[in-house]
Image: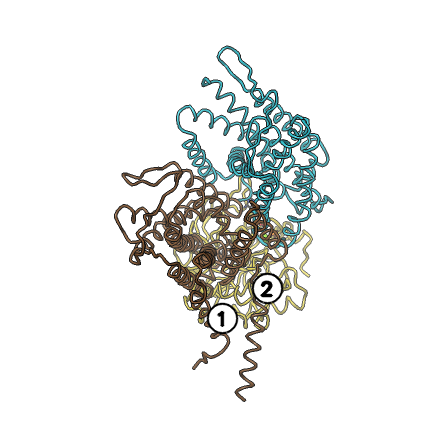
Chain colours: A cyan, B brown, C yellow
Amino acid sequence: MGVLSSIINGILMGGVYGLLAMGLTLIFGIMKIINFAHGAFLMVAMILSYWLWKIMGLDPYLSIIIIAPLMFLLGYLTQRFTIKPVLDAEKDVREPIGALLLTAGLAVAIENFILMVFGADYLMAKTAYSGASINISSLSISVPRLYAFVTSLVVAFLFYQFLIKTELGRAMRATGQDRGVALLMGINVSKVYSIAFGIGTALAGLAGIVLIPFYYAHPSVGAVFITKAFIIVVLGGLGSVHGALVGGLIIGLIESVAAQYMTATWTAILIYFAFLAFLLLKPSGLFGSRYEW
Amino acid sequence: MRNFITPRYYLPALMIFILLLIPLFISSPYILHIMAMVLFWAYLASAWNIVGGFAGQLSLGHGVYVAAGAYVSSLLFANIGLSPWFGMIIGGLVAALLGVIVGYPTLRLRGAYYALATVGFAEGFRVILINTTKIGSWHTGGAEGFLVPLLGDAPQHMQFMSKVPYYYLALVLLLIIVGFSFWLDRSKLGYYLTAIREDEDAALALGINTARAKLIAAALSAFFTGVGGVYYAQLIRYLEPNAIAGAIMSNQIVFLAIVGGRGTVLGPVIGGIFLTIIGEMTRILFDQVMGLHLFLYGIIVVLFVIFKPRGLIELVEKPYEKLVKMLNGRRVEGAS
Amino acid sequence: MPAKVLLELKNVTIKFGGLTAVSDLSFKLFEGEIVGLIGPNGAGKTTVFNLISGVYRPTEGEIYLNGENITGLKPFQICHRGIGRTFQVVRPFGGKSVLYNVMVGAFLRTNDTRKSREKALEVLQLVGLYNKKDVLAKNLTIVDRKRLEVAKALATEPKLLLLDEVLAGLNPAEVDEAVEMIRQIHKSGITILLIEHVLKAAMALSQRIMVLDYGKKIAEGSPEEVTSNPEVIKAYLGDNYGIA
Ligand SMILES: Nc1ncnc2c1ncn2[C@@H]1O[C@H](COP(=O)(O)OP(=O)(O)OP(=O)(O)O)[C@@H](O)[C@H]1O
Ligand SMILES: [Mg+2]
């Protein structure tokens, strides 16, 4: 593959990263919780999508209709029945971390539950377009990645519109800015949290679904993606939705460009280094506000 | 003069006595190995507790210090024959240095940001470990891991054919860290760390050099964790970067402390013992079911965070106090 | 008036972005004084405390304690040098007992746990929280939280104590009690600068009052002088606050 091709394919992957990171940053922006189970949710969606394809022959993109609402529900209920009680109990703690620990525990439980039920195999939905590519002279663009990219952008766009145009979206942003004021405005904060967590989880799920035609799923695949998502949200500014998308694209780009000059692992080290530099020097990231650190 | 024949003193003494006797009644090396691991995990959780519990800095990267202790001592042992007994000190100090290196730039980060930074450091460290096969002429094994040379029975090099010495060594380590935590809990430093956990700005206003206190805590915690890593290296004799420096190690340490009760002297010990025994039992009983034991682990953590956020210690404390009172009462009656 | 200057602010200004919260403020505090700092909401009173105690660094100007320039020192260094403060929005170590809270402060002057406990108990006696020493700080009533706030600061053995609205939210009987407590503290030789919205109490306590409006000092003098100053009446007393 030529340099340009791999760069383009890297950016395409970056779109998926962005989609995943958006869910994470949404949850943080509104609830101030780092969701360590975000990668596990992505993995669940990948596995579900795979089995729907395997058993019923359902194309992963069609399975969105089933899986996205399911993931929303999973997120909604997770917040309602596990996170909410922890947040309520920690209301007057200055730096509540119970919820963070909770999600870390959930991640372990979910991963190993999937391991128990579906085993440790590497699974990929080998659809008709899985191996396809578009070739323009020496350029070679992977079709499933292109689909994934376009879908991610469309979803990101719709999600953004939802946030700024709808009443619910406004209520969510108000809650993120100041929970107390939101309460005064008559917003049902707890419900907004559940919806935000549901949407965040659904976004992780969507990222998982668009990955499954070209990326192998296994119970701990979430770990790979969640560290990337952490890096991206810090880069883009925790809580910044467009920051997440841009951050995703940047990381996708860096990965593919750096891969031309060094081994993947040194790229990883480079990215961690950049991540730490941002966290330490500019915790607000590229697009975040200075609040809260 | 204080009376030492009260339940306050003889109950803990009794417990230590029982722990000392255990190897006399258990001959299975396998079980002794598990018991040593139980004590070892309790030790690690207590070491984490200094920074994660007392100071309230949620470190999710303590695997780094385990790895630092383990690798430093093992490399020195394999290459220049330095006894791991000395390695314990050097490994601990290197870990403490790393603790300060991680601690310094993260001083002003709070809550989730601090946690994320520790994840970043740990992951970066792990990746470096995987990709380094040599330091100078010393082989580190890279992703394949590092085999600690086996000498057979060599007490001067912390190697024993029997599991009994390992058990006792873990017990000694655990007693040391519990003693230290006990002191810390009542000392100025302990008060300062707790104040920082509760409200850092208020702590600053009371004249606490919060940066220095946090760095001291980070160094102490990393030191003890690194010493644990040295022990681990000699007990397991195989160092695998993903297992030792990865998220599994780091998270496990935190989970034990949380389930037991972070910020308390004995919480992490209780959590370490309880969860490790549960983990081992499910591993033995359902060894065909992949993932079950970690699944239960995760569920237990979740349940504790939701229903008993202060940890198991809360459940143990009251009955213990009752027992002390009851025994006290009996003694007084007996005396009259 | 006692001669020795304890604290001096020289032309202190702080800006937050476009907002000048404190503007060219200068004043002196003499050893043994009780001085009141009043002004309408948002006048910059708490910001003055944050400047003195080192939470913020002034954009311009200097702060001297006993002739030593303490501008730019960290809050803990300033506390070491003998300035204690309370927070308007109280900040107890919620999960710990009252005694524990105060011991944290007392540890500033000793490394010995027993001595720290003795000191803390002494202070608790003074502020009237002795009987609640084992209560968790988060379970205290608002009055007691304010007392605890004072106790923590007192335990650090300050020469100068900055009290930020410790009387706010108390009922009249409680205010009287607290005023008496502040007198006691003053009597023990501690210089006090207090911010108050309860004007009656501020007037009763203070030997001298400074009035702040929009970050500027608009008046200074005895309580009588200040209350008859037309500018003060315009800026402040014309507000919702009458001198009841
Ligand atoms: N850290 C900060 N960043 C930005 N603006 C600030 C900051 N701290 C204070 N301000 C602003 O400075 C002004 C003065 O605030 P300050 O809290 O000092 O008032 P105050 O006189 O104590 O009022 P109150 O009587 O309500 O307590 C306000 O407009 C406030 O919004
Ligand atoms: Mg104020």
Q: Which residue does the numbered mark 1 point to in the structure image?
A: C188
Q: Quadrant of the N terminus of chain B?
A: bottom left
The foreground one among A9 and C10 is: A9
Direction from residue B31 to residue A157 in the image, left or right: right
| Chain under disc 2 | B
Question: What percent of the width, then of the height, locates residue B7?
Answer: 51, 76
Residue C151: x, y in percent? 53, 65
Name the quarter where the C terminus of chain B is drawn. bottom right
In the rendered image, which residue does mark 2 sit on?
B315
Tell me if C135 is positioned left or right of C239 in this view. Answer: left
Q: For the view shown, which residue lies furthest in the left direction? A: B80
Indicate if the residue with disc 2 has its beta carbon within 8 Å of ligand 1: no
Tell me, yes or no, if residue B59 can be seen here: yes
* Local SS, label 1: loop
Measured from the top left, where is residue A103 in percent x and y? 59, 46
**Which residue is more in the foreground, A139 or B150?**
B150
Using the rendered image, report if marks 2 and 1 lie on a common chain. no
Q: Which chain is indicated by disc 1?
A: C
**Residue in the foreground of this view, choosing between C242 and A72:** A72
Q: Identify the element where label 2 is drawn.
A: helix
In this view of the protein, can residue B207 be seen by the observer? no
Q: Amino acid at mark 1?
A: Ser
